[in-house]
Image: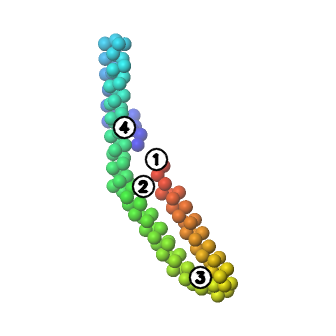
Amino acid sequence: MTASAHSPQAQELKKELAATLDARRELGPEYEAALVDSFVEKVDTQVRRRLAEERLRTARGGPGGADSAVAAFGERFGFAVVTLVLAIPLSAIGAAQAGIGGLLVAWAGICGVNLAHTGRLRRTTADPLA
């Protein structure tokens, strides 16, 4: 999101700064605060515009946008379905071999795998700006 020194926005800010410094020289130090405030307001406006553009780009499917949220949901849902399907034979085997203890161990493993997968997804989809 940083502008290069040769971008149109950077060139515009350089011109604004030069104009502000020239005005300060002509008007004297008594207008310095007003000139600085005006320049800071222009910089703030450009920063806000760039942030808005970045958010719009992200919302339209850029990194961390809506498309990646849908993909993350699809991955979570698919993983949950697979583990529930596999839970049926694992539960039967655990209960047949070791009774209620085997059933509990099988479900503890299923829950542990799902929790580990959820933690991995949260780390990979976390927003660095948040």
Q: Which corner quadrant of the image does residue 24 belong to?
A: top left
| Residue 25 x %, y % | 34, 13
Q: Residues within 10 Å of mark 3 (few under 14, many from 20)?
A: many
Mark 3 or mark 2, which is nearer the start of the sequence?
2
Q: What is the distance, in whole Å, between disc 4 and disc 1 at their CAs?
A: 15 Å
Mark 4 or mark 3, which is nearer the start of the sequence?
4
Q: Could you say which disc has been placed on residue 38 in the image?
A: none
Which amino acid is tagged 4? Answer: Val
Outermost bottom residue: 96
Mark 1 or mark 2, which is nearer the start of the sequence?
2
Outermost front residue: 100
Mark 1 vs mark 3: give the one in front: 3
Q: What is the distance, in whole Å, between disc 1 and disc 3 at their CAs?
A: 42 Å
Which amino acid is tagged 1? Answer: Leu
Which amino acid is tagged 2? Answer: Gly
Mark 1 or mark 4, which is nearer the start of the sequence?
4
Q: Could you say which disc has been placed on residue 47 in the image?
A: 4
Q: Could you say which disc has been placed on residue 129 in the image?
A: 1
Q: What is the distance, in whole Å, between disc 2 and disc 3 at their CAs?
A: 37 Å
Which amino acid is tagged 3? Answer: Ser
Q: Could you say which disc has been placed on residue 64 in the image?
A: 2
In the displayed structure, does residue 33 sit left or right of residue 110? left
Q: Residue at x 62, y 73 (%)?
A: 108
Question: Label 1's element?
Answer: loop
* Residue placed under numbered mark 3 in the picture: 91
Tag 2–tag 3 contact (CB < 8 Å): no
60 lies above or below 6? below
| Residue 128 x %, y % | 48, 49
Question: Label 4's element?
Answer: helix
Tag 1–tag 3 contact (CB < 8 Å): no
Mark 2 or mark 4, which is nearer the start of the sequence?
4
